[in-house]
């Protein structure tokens, strides 16, 4: 699996996720993407749009950095239904260290990704996590139950990033 995203969209999403919120400690967003194949038959996910979660769609919850409500979730599910495209939950861990999912992320995000797959079961859906100076992604492939790490992520533009 290979994800490609333009530098412009990558920077825009990261900047949005770094904005302060009145009560949430972090921001959440979603990417929409298309699935295509390379000449070698490798799956390529082309991220084409970033959707920010509206301020009013966050729940007050002191137990987690950010919690979104059913309105935000219904919006992304409707996008998947309308477009037939792939969706990625995204947020940022803007601190040094190894970039990975927190225990809370591991418990709360996979059921959301599974709901994406319930709407569009023929496509992979996933998580795109920004770090302080890095990024990582996991996908839930059709007919599977476990997230798999994405082997390659390319940020197209200057400076070019290939992970």
Image: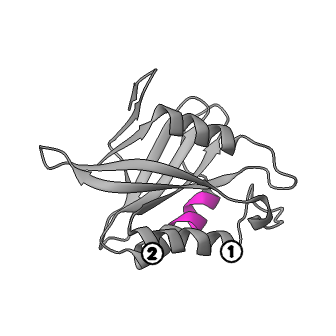
85 or 121: which is nearer to us? 85
Residue 76's quadrant in the figure?
A: bottom right
Q: Which residue is drawn at 52% across and 34% down?
A: 8
Q: Name the residue under label 1.
A: 71
108 magenta-colored: yes
Question: What residue occupies the far right of the structure in this picture?
Answer: 22
- Residue 34 shown left or right of residue 22 in the figure: left
Determine which of the numbered discs, if any, sits on residue 32 in the image: none
What residue is shown with label 2? 81
Graded by Cα atoms within 10 Å as few (under 14), some (14 to 19) or many (20 or more), the crowding at tag 2 reads some
Q: How is the image coloured?
A: one colour
Q: Is residue 134 above or below residue 51?
A: above
Q: Magenta stretch containing residue 88, yes or no?
A: no
Q: Residue furthest top?
A: 159
Horizontal side of residue 121 vs 133, given as left or right: left
> Residue 126's quadrant in the figure?
bottom left
Q: Read off the magenta span.
A: 104-110
Image spot of residue 116 (x, y percent): 46, 71
Looking at the rendered image, the quarter that the C terminus falls into is: top left
Q: Nearer the viewer, residue 136 or 13?
A: 13
State the SS at label 1. helix
| Vertical arrangement, residue 68 with respect to residue 25, above or below | below
Dot 1: few (<14), some (14–19), or many (≥20) neighbours within 10 Å? some
Whether residues under marks 1 and 2 lie with C-beta atoms below 8 angstroms apart, the answer is: no
Relative to residue 31, is residue 97 drawn left or right?
right
Judged left or right of residue 159, residue 102 is right
Q: Where is residue 14 in the image (x, y as percent from the top left)?
A: 61, 39
């Amino acid at each position: 699996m290979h994800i490609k995203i333009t530098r412009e969209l990558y920077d825009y999403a990261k900047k949005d996720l770094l904005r302060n919120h009145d009560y949430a400690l972090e921001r959440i967003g979603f990417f929409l993407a298309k699935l295509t194949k390379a000449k070698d038959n490798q799956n390529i996910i082309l991220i084409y749009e970033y959707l920010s979660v509206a301020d009013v769609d966050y729940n007050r919850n002191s137990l987690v950095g950010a919690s979104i409500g059913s309105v935000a979730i219904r919006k992304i599910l409707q996008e998947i239904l309308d477009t037939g495209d792939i969706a990625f939950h995204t947020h940022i861990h803007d601190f040094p260290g190894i970039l990975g999912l927190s225990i809370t992320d591991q418990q709360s995000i996979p059921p959301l990704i599974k709901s994406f797959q319930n709407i569009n079961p023929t496509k992979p859906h996933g998580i795109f996590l920004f770090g302080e100076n890095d990024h990582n992604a996991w996908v839930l492939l059709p007919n599977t139950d476990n997230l798999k790490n994405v082997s390659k992520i390319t940020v197209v533009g200057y400076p070019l990033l290939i992970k």
